Amino acid sequence: MHPLEHRIPPPVVALIVAAAMWMNSISGPKLDLPFEVRIAMALVIAAVGVAFDLLGFLAFRKARTTINPLKPQNTSALVTTGVYRYSRNPMYVGLVCFLLAWTAFLAALWPLAGPILFVFYINRFQIEPEERLLAKRFGEEFSSYRARVRRWL
């Protein structure tokens, strides 16, 4: 097990990435978009993120399983219904949407790397270890789910 696996809560990772995106937006090339367009794009993308996060959270609550990403060993149910029919990780999709909304608001080129870096980090240090645990705990049920539902979208 790598020391970064399940150590930093994904929302904290997203905040760190968002701060780096902001710092990079100051010095890099900008897109010439009116403020109103930037706000509108950011709000639409953020609303999609809120929907993914909320639907994922509610599905976990309904199944009475943990939502704590740092304690996947406390998982008591494999959730495969609702938004989990479309993504194995809708709450992480929601965080990516927030970063994309931030990218739209910043209207700069360098911040585009932020959501990509977030996905790579979350895949390696959060999702892969979670999926190893789910495979052990739920066996064929998880293997079947993984075969029919994509990790992201």
Image (cartoon, helix red, strand yellow):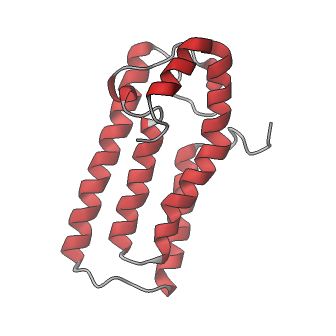
Is residue 85 or residue 17 the one in the foreground? 85
Is residue 35 or residue 109 the one in the foreground? 109
Residue 5 found in image quarter: top right
Is residue 19 or residue 113 the one in the foreground? 113
Residue 141 found in image quarter: top right
Left or right: 21, with 86 as reference point: right
Instruction: Give the residue drawn at x 45%, y 26%.
Output: 148
Residue 135 found in image quarter: top right
Question: Which residue is situated farthest in the front direction here?
Answer: 147
Quadrant showing the N terminus: top right
Q: How many marks?
A: 0
**Residue 141 in view in this figure:** yes
User: Looking at the image, is 102 positioned above or below residue 6?
Assistant: below
Percent from the top left, x then y, of residue 140?
Answer: 58, 13
Instruction: Give the residue drawn at x 33%, y 31%.
Output: 55
Instruction: Give the residue drawn at x 29%, y 47%.
Output: 48
Percent from the top left, x then y, of residue 111?
Answer: 48, 71
Quadrant showing the C terminus: top left
Left or right: 38, with 113 as reference point: left
Percent from the top left, x then y, of residue 71?
Answer: 64, 27
**Residue 71 in view in this figure:** no
